Every structure is written in structure tokens, then in C-alpha cells.
Image: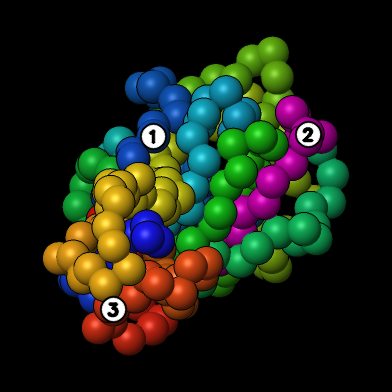
Amino acid sequence: MRWIRSLLCIIIGLGCSFSLVAVSITVGNGTLSSYLPMNRTSVYSCYESIIAQTELAYAGNIRRISFEKASGSDVNPIQNVTIYLKHTTATELATGVYSTTGYTQVYAGNYTNDVTSGWMSVLLSTPFNYNNVDNLQILIVKGMQTALATTVAPKYTYTSTTPTYRTRFATSNTAQPTSLTRSYTRSNIRLEITGPPVFSVNPTVVDFGQHNTSDVIAPIPVTVSNIGEEPLQVVSVELTGDTAFTLTDANTYPRDLCT
């Protein structure tokens, strides 16, 4: 008599609608304010800063960036803003010419400025996959926009990073600045990060017991799910090994497995 395990049915819950669950990380808690990072008292401005890995300590896709507006009666959008992100091993910035080499452009357009105080945020058009190994470097280039009076321009909270120069910036009323001056004044920033997908299967082991070769037992469902934050794409499901097993799967692929 031959003993076998007879029938396997895998059920995969896919194709659902979902919203990403993001972790919100705030770097900096100072309450003093400056016109950085997007200086509206000048026609052009540029700002660059470094955030240490220890200040983030979370891997995943950076999807939203926010700065805390402390004051400013002007509530018009900040125009011509381009944001870049990159990984870096550097820990501080020196006075000198900046470069976009190595950066990924993650946003271009108007920056939110719709209330007189509070966190002003933009959703990145290109999420940045932060590795939680290197430090994170951010570059914000604000293009031409008519300058505002200092009495109405937005000011943002900052935290001093002394004795380490983790910021550099410059402003101009004639042309986009290229050389930046180092500073301890780093604007408080909030990053929304979604973690990676995590594959899960339940049950992890299926015991069919012992049966005669002619036996057909009831299907045993196996549910595959994503317990992470980002969507997980399944491109195929295959059964290998003993041909006495049968796979029943009504899904079509590829499919996104949501949380």
C-alpha cells in the first residue's frame, strides 16, 4: 500500500484597497525660528542639511516631508521649490558650492503655506527608499519668487546642531545661489516613512496525515498575507514536488498584496 498526502488548496487574499500606514519621525525640538529652509525674504534661496541615522533609526520609503511654521501672516504657496534626498556618510557640511550629484529629486512644485503656523507638508512625487544605514542629506532649492517683507514672511522652528555644522544655506535677489555658508541652524523636520512589505503565510506547515493512494481529502486552505506596510506584489504561485498534490488558485497575477 502506498501512502501519500493528497490535495492542497492555497487561498490568497489579494486586490484589496488600502491606505499606507506611515511612521512619523520628527527631528529637532527647538522653538526658536528663522526664515530657513525656504527663505521668502529673498527672491532665491538654497538650503542643505544632514540628518544622522541615529536621529531616524527607521528604514523605509520617505513619502512626506514637513517643516514647522512658527509664524508669518503670508499664506500664499511657496513657488518653484525642488527637493532632493540622498544617502551620505558625511556628518557635517562645509561652506562651498553645492552639487546635485548623488541626489534623487523627490519633489518639484509649490510648497504648502496655507496657515500662519503649524506643520507645512508636501507629499513627495517620488518616495525615497531610506536604508537606515547611512545618514540622510536633504537639499531644497527655492527658485524665483518675489520677495516678502520680513514682517510677513514665514519663519520656521529650528534646533541648533552645535558643535557640528549640519546645515548650509544662501539667499540672493539676483540669481540662484550656488555657494552655501555653513550653519548650526537646522530646521525642525518631520518625515513620514512607510516600512517594507513582510511576507506571511498561515499555516506555515500543513500535515495531511497518511492516506491511501485513492483517497481524496478536503482542501486545506493556506492564506498568504502581507503584515508589513508597503504593498507586496505577487507575480505567481507555483506548486513543485510530488505530483499527487493539486493546487487550486483562482487569482490572476500579478496582484498587490496589501496590509
Mark 1 / mark 2, whichever is N-terminal: 1
Residue 114, image quadrant: bottom left
Residue 128 % position (x, y): 54, 57
Residue 180 seen: yes
List the residue tagged with mark 1: 25
As for residue 214 lying within the magenta part, the answer is: no
* Residue neighbourhood size for the residue with mark 1, other residues' Cα within 10 Å, grouped as few (<14), some (14–19), many (≥20): some
List the residue tagged with mark 3: 249
Which dot marks residue 90? 2
Residue drawn at x 30%, y 36% is 70
Q: CA distance from mark 2 to mark 3?
A: 50 Å
**Identity of the amino acid at label 3?**
Asp
Q: CA distance from mark 1 to mark 2?
A: 21 Å
Q: Is residue 242 above or below residue 227?
A: below
Q: As drawn, is 141 to the left or to the right of 199?
A: right
Mark 1 / mark 3, whichever is N-terminal: 1
- Residue positioned most to the top: 163
**Identity of the amino acid at label 2?**
Ala
Residue 76 % position (x, y): 29, 65
Residue drawn at x 69%, y 46% is 87
Q: How is the image coloured?
A: rainbow
Residue 173 % position (x, y): 62, 62
CB of mark 1 within 8 Å of CB of mark 2?
A: no
Q: CA distance from mark 1 to mark 3?
A: 41 Å
Which numbered disc, 1 or 3, marks the residue closer to the eye?
Answer: 3
Residue 157 % position (x, y): 39, 32
* Residue neighbourhood size for the residue with mark 2, other residues' Cα within 10 Å, grouped as few (<14), some (14–19), many (≥20): some
As for residue 93 lying within the magenta part, the answer is: yes
Residues in magenta? 76-94
